[in-house]
Every structure is written in C-alpha cells, then in structure tokens.
Amino acid sequence: KAGVTQTPRYLIKTRGQQVTLSCSPISGHRSVSWYQQTPGQGLQFLFEYFSETQRNKGNFPGRFSGRQFSNSRSEMNVSTLELGDSALYLCASSPSGSGREETQYFGPGTRLLVL
Amino acid sequence: AQSVTQLGSHVSVSEGALVLLRCNYSSSVPPYLFWYVQYPNQGLQLLLKYTSAATLVKGINGFEAEFKKSETSFHLTKPSAHMSDAAEYFCAVIVSYKLIFGSGTRLLVRP
C-alpha cells in the first residue's frame, strides 16, 4: 500500500497570505489527523477528522481550519499567515480512528516558511 | 490530564554501545504509549507501541521498550547502537484520537 502523501512538500508564503495543504491517507484509512511541528513548541495536535466530521481540535486560533472529503482526503487551511506559522505540518492517518490503541501513520510533512 | 515527559533532549553514545532513551508518563487510566522516530527531513515512523498485551514490547530496527507501571516509565532501549540510529525519538500517549508527544530526544551516535 502507498503511504500517507502530502502536497506540496515545501511552501514559501508571505505574511497575510493564506495557504492550503493537502493530505491523502493510506488507502482504506478513514481517520486523518494534523500536527504542527516547530523547534520551540514541538509536536502539537491541530485537529482530527473521521468520516468528514471533525472529532477533536487542538488549541490553535480560528485561522487554522480543515476539512475531510468523502474519499478521506483532507485539507488544512491557514489564513492570514503569521511568521510564527512557519513549521512542518504533518498529516497522519489511521484505519478507523477507534482511539486508544490504533497506530497513526505519518506522511513526510509539508514544510511551510512564512516570510 | 495524560502526558509524557522525555528526560534528556540530547543523548550521545558510541557505535556499539547501549542506547537508553527515557520516557515517563502521567495517566489516571492505563495508557497506550508509542515511540516514533524522525529522520532528518522526514515524517514520523512508528518504532513500537504498548497496548497492555505485554509489558516488554519489541519494535523495528532492534529497539524495544518495557512498560513499568510502578515507575510510570516506558523507556526505549537498543543493545548496540548503529550509526543509522542517529535521529530524533518521540514518546507519545494517545488521548481522544490525538497523540500527545514528549519534547523529543535527539540521539547522536559517535563512530
């Protein structure tokens, strides 16, 4: 099976712009989660989707949003970019998102640089 | 609230030496714990996970971890370090569909 794919891999934007990142989960996986990784804050959970519904959301401002499509592909959007949004954005998928013991499989990430 | 703490942001070992990366958890319920590895410019790869089936968990690349409830620990070990083990390692606990990560430990392997 192909792994989790994320596009684009690298992105440069300027402050105030918006950006959309895409994630295709492993075939058959229905749960998609997003994480932000920065040197200062480490790995932080953004949100999780299952069957097109957001089930959990991290502590991020409303500028960060996401959605999931009927084929389980997911996008996240960041509006009005700030310098502090520069980070590696990681997507992870799991089969059913049943919770506690299910492994999340990660994609290679999208590295966003905000100038 | 459930959380994990990784002691030591950097660990340096010689090639062939024992690798020990520390992780302690805080949880009021039996936790489900994970170790992930991240190589430069890559995503996270699962090394192993604890799901209460066995306290000693064997993972990929010769790594293993032992769940010790009395010490609230889930330390990662490998008997003999290889140069290719140089990477950043993250311990995590899963809570309500989300992974909560420790701050990570960067492993340096000296020739």
Image: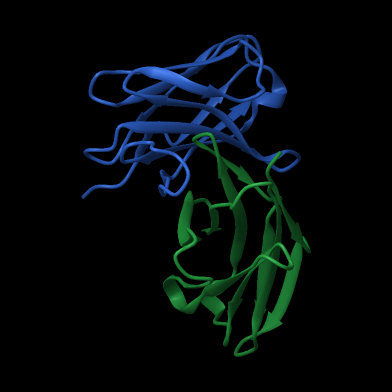
Chain colours: A blue, B green
Instruction: Give the percent coordinates (x, y) of residue A86.
Output: 64, 29
Residue A80 horizontal side relative to residue A108, left or right: right
Q: Quadrant of residue B20?
A: bottom right
Whether residue A79 is visible, yes or no, is: yes
Whether residue B40 is visible, yes or no, is: no
The foreground one among A97 and A2 is: A97
Residue A15 horizontal side relative to residue B51, left or right: right
Instruction: Give the percent coordinates (x, y) of residue A56.
Output: 52, 24
| A112, above or below B81, in the image | above
User: Which part of the image, by quadrant, shows the C terminus of chain B?
Assistant: bottom right
Instruction: Please identify the residue farthest to the right as the structure is shown.
Output: B8
Look at 57% across and 10% down and name the residue there. A79
Look at 46% across and 32% down and name the residue there. A33
Q: Quadrant of residue A73?
A: top left
The foreground one among B65 and B13 is: B65
| B17, above or below A80, in the image | below
Look at 56% across and 72% down and name the residue there. B65
| B52, above or below A93, in the image | below
Q: Quadrant of residue A40?
A: top right
Residue A5 horizontal side relative to residue B77, left or right: left
User: Which part of the image, by quadrant, shows the N terminus of chain B?
Assistant: top right
The foreground one among B22 and B104 is: B22
